[in-house]
Image (tube, grey):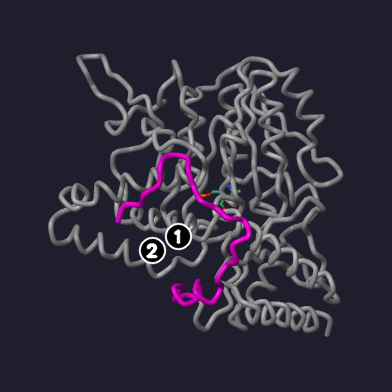
Amino acid sequence: MTIGLQDGTRADPATRVIDVAAERSRTAGTAGRHYFNAAGAGLVSDGVLEAVVAHLRREQRVGGYEAANEAADDVAAVYTSAAALLGARADEIALFDSATSGLRGVFDALRLGAGDTVIAPRSSYVSQALRLLAMQRHDDVRLVVVPNDASGAMDLEVLERAVAGASGRVVVSAVHVPTSSGLVEPIAEVSAIARRHGAWTVVDATQSVGQIDIDVTAVDCDALVTTGRKFLRGPRGTGLAYLRRGTLEGLGAWAPDVRGAVWTGEDEWTMDGTARQLETWECSVASRLGLGVALREALDRGPAATEAHLVALGSRIRAALAEIDGVTVADPPASPSAIVTFTVDGLVGKEVSTRLRTRRIDSIAVPASHAQWDLGTRGLPSVVRVSPHVYNDDEDVRVLLDGVAEVATEARS
Ligand SMILES: Cc1ncc(COP(=O)(O)O)c(C=O)c1O
């Protein structure tokens, strides 16, 4: 089941048309529902499911270690596919069980302490923001939260001043697409500013990989982390990170694990020089194989074509929602992603989402507690988030828009 991709290569005609009917026919979850929660967890394809289940069956039959040995080529292909998708090398990829564990691994390894600085955007995700706040509180790391410009994205002039004036070792904890809006942050510009001043850039691309075409060489970041289950459409409990070769030079994993370290003597060990030094030995091989299938499907579909399709779909939904009485689109101007957020007059987000679910429409409410620096500052207790993927057809969109209009009308009466 290995694929013939070389590290960092991919064939990706941006003009390729996404075959929505074919995507639906290989995604059982599209039957009978109108699923708009890819930003929560995208629907996995039948092929992803089969890969996971087949490996679990094999583990039951021959044992976990033996099944892993049999699947060694397919596991290796997960790294190659991830590298191909991101424009990286396979040895710059580490696999995790979530984006959060990937971000933890990277930030732990950077070993920031008193006098060092982390700079973050207002679009930071709750778990990363809390991690940075905890570093500020417990480790005396200086935290700078950069305000937005008029477009709603990170103000690059303020960022440049913050990086230039920062003390100690400096890390920009960047976000590509947040959990709380369709914003797309200018990560290449953010990275370029950081690099000009000798700072590191770690990108949280959890909501963008699988949705937006990313080439880490063009972005020029030091690390980039994502989850498997969202726009990549992998199984839950998977995540991956790109770690540029040499980033951890002289540092090494904060918590060496037998996966990436060799215990060579009484008090000596050596580290695997690759990104895998951040991994742990134990993992769900079945889930990783499922992630491998999802990555191959993303590559086959074409990252640039997928981006064009999803961005157009998001814009179409956003524009149509804006026309509905009692509905206010909550996305800031710099929001061309497939994530669309809105509010309905008179109803909290959770109530809107619950009412949509009775119409077999899956959306989610994002509370301010998941994005205090964004929704909290904008005075929004919650927003409703819809996030389509390539398996959503015109009928799904029609049902969604009618459903939201009905809910808005109910709220007024
Ligand atoms: C922008 C962003 N970053 C990070 C995360 C955390 O991902 P995970 O749940 O895989 O740790 C999320 C989850 O929703 C997210 O939206």
Q: For residue 297, which numbered disc appears in the image? A: 1
Q: Which residues are magenta?
A: 1-29
Is residue 411 depicted above or below 312 in this figure?
below
Q: Is residue 112 left or right of residue 174?
A: left
* 3D distance between C-alphas at marks 2 and 1: 9 Å
- Depth check, front residue: 256 or 48: 48
- Dot 1 falls on a residue whose secondary structure is helix
Q: Is residue 314 left or right of residue 297?
A: right
Is residue 375 depicted above or below 104 in this figure?
below
Query: Residue flagged by tag 2: what amino acid is it?
Result: Val
Q: Could you tell me residue 179's position as x and y percent?
A: 64, 53
Q: Is residue 301 left or right of residue 2?
A: right
Which residue in the protein does label 2 denote? 48
Residue 3 is a magenta residue: yes
Q: Nearer the viewer, mark 2 or mark 1?
A: 1
Q: Quick one: label 2 or label 1, which is nearer the N terminus?
A: 2
- Dot 2 falls on a residue whose secondary structure is helix
